[in-house]
Image (cartoon, coloured by chain):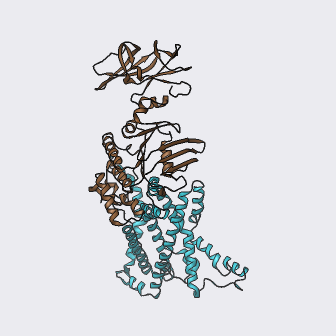
């Protein structure tokens, strides 16, 4: 049972502020993904929770206990490192057993736990090997097994799949999800890969510039971005944004078309590329690039002089230079405040 | 031509080694088994038969056995401290390394000025009223004081070389391993014992081999502090070569030093062997 509470945690390195007063509560057994581009503070936040970094201000609570003054070993956590940090001088068995040995657990229990987690990660045939004799994927499995063997309340993962090749990453992703759901631990997972975040998370915390911009479930983050940044960061291709001119009474004119919108002083129109379809009336788009991708066709176009993308049925193959009318799905249109960048 | 180039480039160094290392070595080895123009082991039996041989041999061994572990412990401690420093690291490293720049004879003389009858230690003892008049510390009655003085001088002089090697070695251990140890519950001592030390093995090998070989060759410090009171293998070699004009016996001593050095090098390599696949 471990709820993690982060209360007004800030971290500065010299004159650089890595985290601006972050508040976040992670529920027991929740899979929380911290998502953001490099330098957004996600790894710093994870390391503060782990105890490898001390917050400049703020508090960290794990399972109702304040831990920010405790060394990592007293926090009831286990961690999977980006470069695995599988000890080269120990066999796979001893690597998995490392944390248990530090706790002076008796040999029978160590053997039982190592065998069980090794089996879970499908590395039971590698127990006698050294890490130098393992592939990247196998090392990754050892690192996860070492964390699971601790049967910790909290598992922290720092970009654990980023060093694997694409195919292996896909396979490990699915496996991790299954294993972690079964282990019933609270998981915090740092990644810059939005697909990884969407597929694994119960909740995603999107981070930017040392702040958490939105913390919500993956579909919510995707459908209803709380800020312009979230829409432009998540989704491949990301959200389209167009300037909107007020047309009175909650109406907005976008590229010559009039849409119902919020009552505000200024607004920016946003739509996801897949929420568009060709129609008689719609946004006038001049096709620039056509990329047939198999399941669909990706169109890069220009709408009122602004770059604009649409994902269309793959039987539609316009030529560059064609004019298309693209109609947005009405309930998928989002509006952002150009000044504060947050959703309206 | 490109295939020959590497060998060509190695040629000057190889020639240098052959001329100034291999040739004298063969010469000494040859001298040690040659007496009056015939091949014989008489040099070795003369050496072993001399009453000072066993004293010199054991003095050398005991000196190494005392000095090297002290240096190892100190070098490990100093290296750990230096590695942890956030700033001022290179300044501290330079200060620690100053004795390295002093020749061993000069180091011996420095410590002689501490321990001799008119030296600092005696002045201090007299000044504090602990003794009435200066005492002869380095006399033949007190070889144990000579021994301690030599240990001090050696530790002072040559610990830094081990430290420098260990600092470099610790720098090569990725930080993540230490962090993993922290997260998985290791105390500071456990982290040192179970992670740092095993991963430091290659550097420990280098540092120990270097130091042990130099410890078997200890000479100037011993002569400066003890004269002939505390014979060691190297001082006996010198004695037989120059005082006794017995080139063959001196060569035999040199071969013994070589043999001991090789034996210990192999032992250290074996003990600190890192299995293939277990390397960083």
Residue B145 occupies quadrant: bottom right
Q: State which quarter of the image contains the C terminus of chain B.
A: bottom left
What x and y, as percent, mark residue A147? 39, 53
For residue A159, what is the image quadrant?
top left
Q: Colour of chain B?
A: cyan
Q: Up-down: is B185 above or below A30?
A: below
Residue B165 in the image: state x and y as whole percent.
49, 61
Q: Residue furthest left?
A: A125
Chain A colour in the picture = brown
Q: Is residue B238 visible?
A: yes
Q: Residue at x 54, y 57 (%)?
A: B84
Left or right of A113? Residue B66 is: right
Along the line of sight, the residue nearer the viewer: A244 or A331: A331
Is the residue A246 above or below the residue B90 in the image?
above
Pick whichever, A51 or B113, lies toward us.
A51
Of B43 and A336, the residue lying toward us: A336
Name the spot of residue B112 as percent of width and height, x first. 62, 76
Which residue is found at the position 70% from the left and 85% from the top? B131
> How many labels were placed on the picture?
0
Asked if A198 appears above or below A278 in the picture, the reply is: below
Q: Examine the image and state in which quarter residue B265 appears.
A: bottom left
Q: Residue at x 44, y 85 (%)?
A: B54
Q: Is residue A83 visible?
A: no
């Amino acid at each position: 049972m471990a709820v993690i509470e982060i209360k007004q945690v800030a971290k500065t390195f010299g004159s650089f502020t890595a985290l601006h007063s972050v508040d976040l509560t992670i529920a027991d057994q929740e899979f929380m993904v911290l998502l953001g581009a490099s330098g957004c503070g996600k790894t710093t936040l994870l390391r503060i929770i782990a105890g490898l970094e001390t917050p400049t201000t703020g508090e960290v609570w794990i399972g109702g206990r304040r831990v920010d003054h405790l060394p990592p070993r007293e926090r009831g956590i286990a961690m999977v490192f980006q470069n695995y940090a599988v000890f080269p001088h120990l066999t796979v068995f001893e690597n998995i057993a490392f944390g248990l040995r530090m706790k002076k657990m008796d040999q029978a229990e160590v053997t039982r736990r190592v065998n069980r987690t090794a089996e879970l990660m499908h590395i039971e045939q590698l127990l006698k090997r050294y890490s130098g004799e393992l592939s990247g994927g196998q090392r990754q499995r050892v690192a996860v097994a070492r964390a699971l063997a601790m049967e910790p309340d909290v598992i922290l993962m720092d970009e654990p799949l980023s060093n694997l090749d694409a195919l292996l990453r896909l396979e490990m992703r699915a496996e991790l999800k299954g294993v972690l759901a079964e282990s019933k631990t609270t998981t915090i997972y740092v990644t810059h890969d939005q697909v990884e975040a969407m597929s694994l998370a119960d909740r995603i915390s999107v981070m930017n510039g040392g702040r958490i911009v939105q913390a919500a479930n993956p579909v919510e983050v995707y459908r209803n971005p709380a800020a312009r940044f979230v829409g432009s960061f998540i989704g491949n291709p990301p959200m389209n944004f167009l300037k909107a001119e007020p047309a009175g009474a909650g109406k907005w004119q976008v590229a010559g078309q009039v849409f119902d919108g919020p009552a505000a002083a200024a607004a920016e129109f946003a739509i996801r590329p897949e929420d568009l379809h060709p129609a008689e009336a719609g946004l006038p788009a001049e096709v620039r690039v056509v990329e047939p991708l198999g399941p669909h066709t990706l169109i890069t176009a220009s709408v009122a002089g602004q770059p604009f993308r649409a994902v269309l049925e793959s039987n539609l193959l316009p030529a560059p230079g064609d004019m298309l009318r693209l109609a947005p799905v009405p309930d998928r249109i989002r509006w952002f405040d150009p000044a504060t960048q947050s959703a309206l | 031509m490109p295939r020959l180039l590497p060998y060509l480039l190695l040629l000057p160094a190889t020639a240098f080694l052959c001329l100034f290392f291999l040739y004298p070595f063969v010469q000494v080895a040859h001298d040690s088994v040659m007496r009056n123009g015939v091949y014989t082991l008489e040099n070795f039996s003369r050496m072993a038969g001399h009453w000072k041989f066993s004293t010199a041999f054991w003095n050398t061994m005991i000196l190494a056995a005392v000095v090297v572990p002290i240096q190892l412990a100190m070098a490990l401690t100093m290296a750990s401290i230096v590695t942890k420093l956030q700033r001022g690291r290179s300044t501290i490293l330079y200060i620690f390394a100053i004795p390295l720049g002093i020749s061993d004879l000069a180091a011996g003389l420095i410590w002689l000025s501490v321990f001799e009858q008119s030296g600092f230690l005696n002045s201090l003892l007299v000044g504090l009223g602990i003794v009435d008049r200066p005492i002869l510390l380095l006399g033949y009655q007190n070889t144990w004081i000579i021994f301690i003085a030599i240990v001090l001088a050696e530790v002072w002089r040559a610990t830094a070389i081990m430290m420098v090697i260990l600092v470099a070695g610790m720098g090569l251990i990725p930080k993540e391993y230490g962090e993993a140890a922290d997260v998985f519950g290791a105390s500071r001592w456990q982290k040192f014992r179970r992670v740092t030390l095993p991963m430091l093995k290659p550097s420990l090998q280098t540092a120990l081999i270097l130091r042990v070989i130099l410890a078997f060759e200890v000479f100037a410090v011993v002569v400066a502090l003890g004269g002939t009171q505390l014979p060691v293998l190297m001082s006996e070699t010198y004695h037989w070569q120059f005082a006794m004009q017995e080139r063959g016996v001196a060569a035999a001593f040199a071969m013994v030093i070589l043999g001991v050095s090789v034996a210990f090098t192999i032992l250290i390599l074996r003990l600190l062997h890192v299995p293939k696949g277990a390397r960083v």
